Image (cartoon, rainbow, N blue to C red):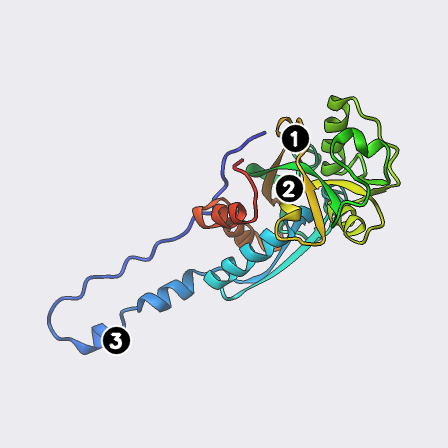
Amino acid sequence: MNRTLRRSAVAVLAAAALALTGCAAAAENTPSPSATAKESAVSGELTVYAAASLSGAFDAIGEAFTAENPDVEFSPVYDGSSTLVTQILEGAPADVFASADEANMDKAADVAVDPTLFASNTLVIAVPAGNPGGVETLADLADVTTVLCAPEVPCGAASAKLLSAAGVTVDAASLEQNVTAVLTKVAASEADAGLVYATDVIGRDDVEVIVPDGADEVVNHYPIAALSDAPNSEAADAFVAFVLSEAGQKILADFGFGAP
């Protein structure tokens, strides 16, 4: 995958040096720094299609991005990456796509411009508070009511890889289309356990977490790309650049994501 960052060209306004002549008219015509910044800011609606596991982090990133670009209306759409890429290929008016794995980004190869990895994530076992099923290891998932992501969803593909490596076969009570749905069922005690991303359980007190053996060997890498037919290509480029910036990476780290 091409990991080269696509950055839009940003014109830099050079202010003419004022001669110290005391000419008030010339001073009045000189653009102020705030005016220059306002002219340089992107604007319009920005629609970002992002994996469900990114919802908290991208809400925070969207808030920080619009603080710098107050004329942008940030409109995120969160769901399973496989669902999002299908919608994009069917013509959904998205500006940016952020996938929870490279496989689904690859499906969008014809419309994704220079996808770049920006984060990583691993799986954990989530159980309801109190762990009523007594789950301790991956092997226990075969003996309790377990919910998993569907295999076409990034968390489902990762779950299948993790379980296969451990030699565990699970007859899932349900196969969900995104990781949020798995966690919702576990938190509501509709299941004894589920495999979710480590980032999904940070700060939750309605579930408990078990880090299974081998989790560090199954890592999801997240790519992001502006789309070639983006309705707001300028804002799309600026948003991708912000996610990859030091500020964006710090927000992702605060939400538990690993480095790309």
The residue that label 1 is drawn on is 215
- Is 177 placed above or below 69 here? above
Spatial separation of the CA atoms under disc 1 and disc 3: 62 Å
Give the residue displayed 45% in from the left and 50% down from the top: 247
**Disc on the earlier residue, 1 or 3:** 3
Instruction: Give yes or no for contact between labels 2 and 3 (Cβ–Cβ under 8 Å).
Output: no
Mark number for residue 145?
none
Q: Is residue 63 left or right of residue 132?
A: left
Give the residue displayed 41% in from the left and 66% down from the top: 38
**Where residue 12 sits: x, y (%)?**
35, 54
Q: Residues within 10 Å of mark 3 (few under 14, many from 20)?
A: few
The residue that label 3 is drawn on is 28
- Of residue 87 and residue 194, the one placed in the foreground of this image is 194
**Where residue 219 sits: x, y (%)?**
63, 31
Tell me the amino acid under the disc marked 1.
Ala
Spatial separation of the CA atoms under disc 2 and disc 3: 55 Å
The number of callouts visible is 3
- Of residue 90 and residue 209, the one placed in the foreground of this image is 209
Tell me the amino acid under the disc marked 3.
Glu
Q: Residues within 10 Å of mark 1 (few under 14, many from 20)?
A: many
**Where residue 111 sits: x, y (%)?**
65, 40
Q: Is residue 91 left or right of residue 33?
A: right
Mark number for residue 198?
2
Instruction: Give yes or no for contact between labels 1 and 3 (Cβ–Cβ under 8 Å).
Output: no
**Disc on the earlier residue, 1 or 2:** 2
Query: From the image, which quarter does the C terminus lie in?
Result: top right
Tell me the amino acid under the disc marked 2.
Ala
